Image: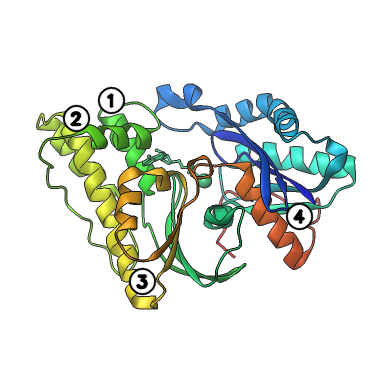
Amino acid sequence: MLVLGIDTSCDDTSIAVYDASNNRVLSNVVSSQYDFHREFGGVVPEIAARKHAENVDLVFEEALRVAGVSPKELGLIAATNRPGLLPALLVGLTFAKGLAYGLSLPFKAVHHIEAHIFSPFIGSEPPFPFLALVVSGGHTLIVLVEGLGRYKLLGKTLDDAVGEAYDKTAKLLGLGYPGGPVIDKIYCSFKGEFLELPRPKVQGLNYSFSGIKTAVRRLAEKGYPKEQIAASFQKTAVSYLLSKLKRAVRETGVKRVAVSGGVSANSLLRQELSKTGWEVYLPPLEFTSDNGAMVAYTGYRRYLLEGEDSLEVGASARAPLG
Ligand code: KG4
Ligand code: ZN
């Protein structure tokens, strides 16, 4: 069965064609809106929605063209309907419903974080149980995944997501948007001494990133070079992410770990994970940030488990996992 996966939850219009019979992604087209949000240093929901509406047709046609399939060959339409920026989500969801209705195909609504969780396993089968660390622009959480739809939330950020902290740090230092890739690059070529940044003290497996942001501002005001601040920020953020993940492994005894979301592209995070001795799963770089492939893959598995969804299903900005 060929599955179309659509994600417009944030600032990427992404559509993929996934061949479920062979567990292969035939196309994964992403139209990124960075240029339109850059001057604001973050995503503006109304601009995101307008750009999705302008692009969704073109991205759909391109996804079919690259995959070499016609709409008639599709067997399932999956789209992210939660959580995310509401006006942005609605564009992809409405487009998906229109296709499903017009082509008389089953439709499946997908949870965005669940799709990230399964993104390291696209092309293979997820080995349960595993610990998932989702690190993106909107989310930072640790989940024990016992099966599809069987989740125990172990910890989450109490304020900013780690990707958001990257973006805000970059904005503060005047490094551009999105902050993650720029700061990662600076870190890789930085040869100087690292500055001490405070590690937020939050109970259990929860995170907090808002304090790091204040520390960054203070260092910038003191006149430290922005490269030194940016590199030090990355060192602290990654070691903080890992410290809680190590604790989660210790507490659950589960040494199989899947890390996903935009920040899972980070080179230091990947390097440090490779030293842990755990069974580590990471998505290929093209599936770290928002993409239609993870939506198609997860939507297909959900469809097998529980069947199709009604076309009356709505979008929600917030939605607990599971
Ligand atoms: O998963 P994603 O595309 O969107 C959300 O669902 O939020 O994640 C985007 C986030 C941005 O905050 C971006 O700065 C961050 O991922 N990011 C990175 C890297 N590449 C992207 N953060 C750290 N290092 C990177 N190499
Ligand atoms: Zn995402």
Residue position marked by numbered label 3 in the rendering: 249
Q: Residue at x 69, y 39 (%)?
A: 92
Q: Is residue 69 above or below residue 174?
A: below
Nearer the N terminus, badge 2 or badge 1? 1
Q: Around disc 3, counting alpha carbons within 10 Å, would you say few (fewer than 14), some (14 to 19), or many (20 or more)?
A: some
Q: Nearer the viewer, mark 4 or mark 1?
A: 4
Callout 4 secondary element: loop
Residue position marked by numbered label 4 in the rendering: 21
Where is residue 119? Give x, y as percent: 55, 52
Q: CA distance from mark 4 to mark 1?
A: 47 Å
Q: Where does the C terminus fall, quadrant-wise? A: bottom right
* Amino acid type of the residue that numbered disc 1 sits on in the rendered structure: Gly
Nearer the N terminus, badge 4 or badge 1? 4
Residue position marked by numbered label 1 in the rendering: 174
Callout 2 secondary element: helix
Residue position marked by numbered label 2 in the rendering: 226
Tags 2 and 1 in contact by the CB under 8 Å rule? yes
Q: CA distance from mark 2 to mark 1?
A: 9 Å
Where is residue 260? Give x, y as percent: 47, 52
Q: CA distance from mark 3 to mark 1?
A: 37 Å
